[in-house]
Image (cartoon, grey):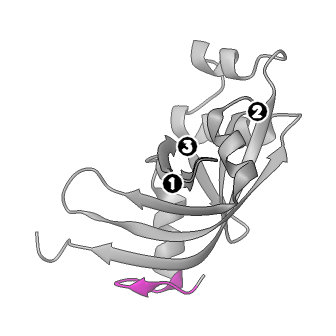
């Protein structure tokens, strides 16, 4: 990743590692119109990783085209964040390892009713790997 904007690669990666705000992911639906959704994410291995149900609409959309745009940005001042575009790949997560990591990251553990429902053996889970191609960063801390 070679970001443009306010931050260098190390600062960008530190932000992505530290922030527990959802990623906003944009893709195209099969008819060609745009779709956006929010997902939990984790940054590792130079990629953004998300988890969702194998039956989620976004999985169908990504099977039509792997081109995506994304944004991870703070919702409170001072506004700062990372946006860009890249490609997405859908990968089975039969052991729900990524989902477990995301539950730990966002909820602190896997003991909540939500976590237990998501980790149910009846639910088929997939990973979405987003490989960033173009990344832009901004930080309005000094202006605010």
Q: Report the quarter where the N terminus lies.
A: bottom right
Question: Is disc 3 surrounded by few (<14), some (14 to 19) or many (20+) residues within 10 Å?
Answer: some
Q: Earlier in the sequence, mark 1 or mark 3?
A: 1
- Residue located 70% across and 60% down the image: 66
Residue bearing mark 1: 26
- Residue located 75% across and 49% down the image: 63
Looking at this rendering, what residue extends furthest in the left direction?
A: 144
At mark 1, the secondary structure is strand
Q: Nearer the viewer, residue 18 or 96?
A: 96
Q: Quadrant of residue 125?
A: top right
At mark 3, the secondary structure is loop
Horizontal side of 96 relative to 31 (left or right) equals right
Residue bearing mark 2: 54
Q: CA distance from mark 1 to mark 3?
A: 14 Å
Q: Nearer the viewer, residue 97 or 57?
A: 57
Residue bearing mark 3: 40
Tell me where the magenta segment starts and ends, as one range. 2-9
Q: Quadrant of residue 19?
A: bottom left
Looking at this rendering, what residue extends furthest in the right direction?
A: 94
Give percent across and percent down for residue 104: 62, 36
């Amino acid at each position: 990743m070679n970001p443009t904007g306010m931050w260098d690669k190390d600062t960008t990666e530190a932000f992505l590692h530290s922030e527990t705000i959802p990623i906003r992911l944009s893709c195209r639906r099969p008819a060609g119109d745009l779709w956006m959704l929010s997902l939990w994410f984790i940054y590792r291995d130079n990629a953004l990783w998300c988890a969702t149900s194998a039956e989620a609409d976004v999985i169908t959309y990504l099977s039509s085209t792997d081109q995506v745009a994304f944004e991870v940005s703070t919702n409170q001042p001072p506004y700062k964040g990372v946006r860009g575009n890249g490609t997405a790949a859908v990968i089975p997560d039969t052991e729900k390892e990524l989902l477990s990591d995301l539950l730990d990251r966002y909820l602190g553990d896997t003991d909540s009713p939500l976590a237990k429902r998501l980790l149910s053996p009846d639910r088929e889970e997939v990973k979405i790997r987003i490989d960033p191609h173009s990344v832009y960063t901004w930080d309005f801390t000094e202006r605010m």
